[in-house]
Image (spheres, grey):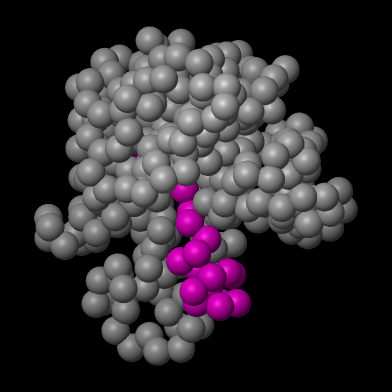
Amino acid sequence: MIVDALTEKIIAMQNPTCVGLDTAFGYLPPELSEGAVTQEEKAAAVYTFNRAIIDAIADMVPAVKVQIAYYEALGPAGLAAFSDTCRYAKRRGLIVIADAKRNDIGSTAAQYAAAFLGPQTENTGGRSLAFAADFLTVNGYLGTDGIAPFTEACAENDKGIFVLVKTSNPSSGELQNLKLADGRTVYECMGDMAEAWGSGSAGAYGYSRVGAVVGATYPAEAKILRARLAHTFFLVPGYGAQGGSAEMLKNCFDGRGLGAIVNNSRGILLAYRKRGGRFDAAAREAASDMKKDLLSVLGAIHA
């Protein structure tokens, strides 16, 4: 089961971190970006950069999160770079989270699910059928009939989803912290729905195929959600550049140091601008420092 596979990698590596490949062309060092003018050239340079980052961190980081918007901005060539990045990360043994925040109902949701959570190859011929993702971020605002096609694809193909519950952006509370008639906040209601959508699919470590996005920048809300969502694995954005610290995000984890994975994008991709040297070596150092920072708060991670 994919959530167990992610958990086992976290335990084995003693590292609950995820490298965000939110790779804007402007993030690339001059040796890769100079001379790239067309979308095809820029997309090729982004993919070269991503491969080097993946190679630098694959033995110490369990997962990558690939944000599709940065690739869509480069048109069809960018989407090819997105697909190639996901597949390369899979070949290097990483768990791949496609950050696409898809949301719709009925047959449209089923098509999104097929694209990101479908089978990787046909039974014959080995033709690619879907992006090489293990998890997909989704928006649950349309309710159960908007999520059902995704959970069905997860069950059929051993994949997972992360539902937006309490996001890390400053204005998230404008909607997510509103009180409902029953006394719950909107984010608590969405968290409860995510817990229910994952019911019956908990794996060996107690977590289901349906996870939640819970921002590191809101530790009080994270504590509430961790207490009420016993079987929901958290994807935690907001560490580093967005202001989240290890101390702030410890509430996302259970007593074993499990149940969450923390994303860091710019802090790793752009580490070379602060540290100097090769961009891939600087990314590895930044990822190592992040691991140490998290473990200094969580302690040893165990089953």
Near-viewer residue (209 or 126)? 209
The residue lying at 20 percent from left, 37 percent from top is 289
User: Who's the residue at 40% across and 74% down the image?
Assistant: 45
> Considering depth in this image, is 243 or 190 the residue closer to the camera?
190
Identify the residue at horizontal 48%, vertical 56% (top origin).
67
Quick one: which residue is furthest to the front in this view? 181
Q: Is residue 298 left or right of residue 69?
A: left
- Quadrant in the rendering for residue 209: top right
Instruction: Point out the residue furthest to the right here.
Output: 124
Residue 279 magenta: no
Where in the figure is residue 145, as x and y percent of width and height? 78, 41
Please provide percent x and percent y for residue 46. Answer: 41, 70
57 falls in the magenta region = yes
Q: Quadrant of residue 112?
A: bottom right
The stretch in magenta equals 55-80
Q: Quick check: 30 left or right of 208?
A: left
* Viewer-nearest residue: 198 or 225: 225
Q: Residue placed at 32% from the left, 79% from the top?
A: 33
Residue 137: image location, x then y, percent: 57, 45
Query: Residue 66: x, y in percent?
Result: 48, 54
Front-lying residue, 102 or 203: 102
Q: Is residue 3 visible?
A: no
- Position of the N terminus, as image quadrant, is top right
